[in-house]
Amino acid sequence: MRRHLPDFPIIALLFALPLLMFWQQTLGGRTLLPTENLFQYEPYASYREVARAPDTPHNALLDDLVLENLQWKSFIRESFAQGEIPLWNPHQFAGIPFLASGQQSTLYPFSVIYYVLPLMGQIFDSAKIQAAGGEESFKGLTGDGLNQVLAVAAQTSFRYVAILPAILLVVFGAIWIYDKSKGGYKPVKLSATAVGSEPR
């Protein structure tokens, strides 16, 4: 254990740096997801002014994060919760292969983070009740009051994604310590024969 003690300040530094660099997301009220992109499409576009979303998103190329990836991960979680493997997606067209495409990274090892975190919908439901001041208060909301509460709840629910970088940092730090305890990286020299060429 003592031989690993010098590694802990390095791990602590690696853990602190992203927290400080992204303090508005990890400690504040911002999110790394391009949530303003949602308001370019219905039904969100009708609430653009209420949510104070810009008319033009900062980077429209990031639409996939909220229009595809979030939906995919939610579908995967729902399938696993029902004891099913998400082989088929019945929500698009007349149904399309899901697991076989691989694009949704269902079997990617670090995708497990998305599966163990609470569903965004559950976070949103809790956030809207809290923003309204209770379930009874929420039931009585209409018009602009309801729109404002839903906008606050949407922002709050997306903030929870900011914890992912911190979790990944701990995971990668543990892998690094384990690798170093085994001797670390050792370069391998390849001969000309090993790479398929003949020496001249």
Image (cartoon, rainbow, N blue to C red):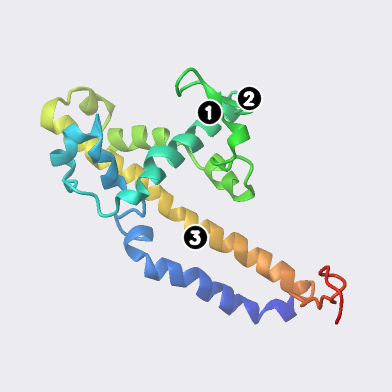
> Within 10 Å of the Cα at label 1, are there few (<14), some (14-19), or many (20+) other Cα atoms?
some
134 or 56: nearer the viewer: 56
Tags 1 and 3 in contact by the CB under 8 Å rule? no
Residue annotated with mark 1:
78
The percent coordinates of residue 178 (x first, y second) are 73, 67
Say what amino acid the circle numbered 3 marks. Ala
In the rendered image, the vertical position of residue 30 relative to residue 83, given as above or below: below
Outermost residue toward the top?
A: 94
Residue 26 placement: quadrant: bottom left
Q: Residue at x 37, y 65 (%)?
A: 22
Q: Position of residue 21 (x, y in %)?
A: 38, 70
- At 55% from the left edge and 33% from the top edge, which residue is drawn? 76
Where's residue 47, x and y in %? 18, 35
Q: In which quarter of the image is residue 70?
A: top left
Distance (Cα) linking label 2 and label 3: 30 Å
Image quarter in which the N terminus is found? bottom right
186 or 133, which is in the foreground? 186
To which residue does mark 3 refer? 166
* In front: label 2 or label 3: 2
Residue position for label 2: 84
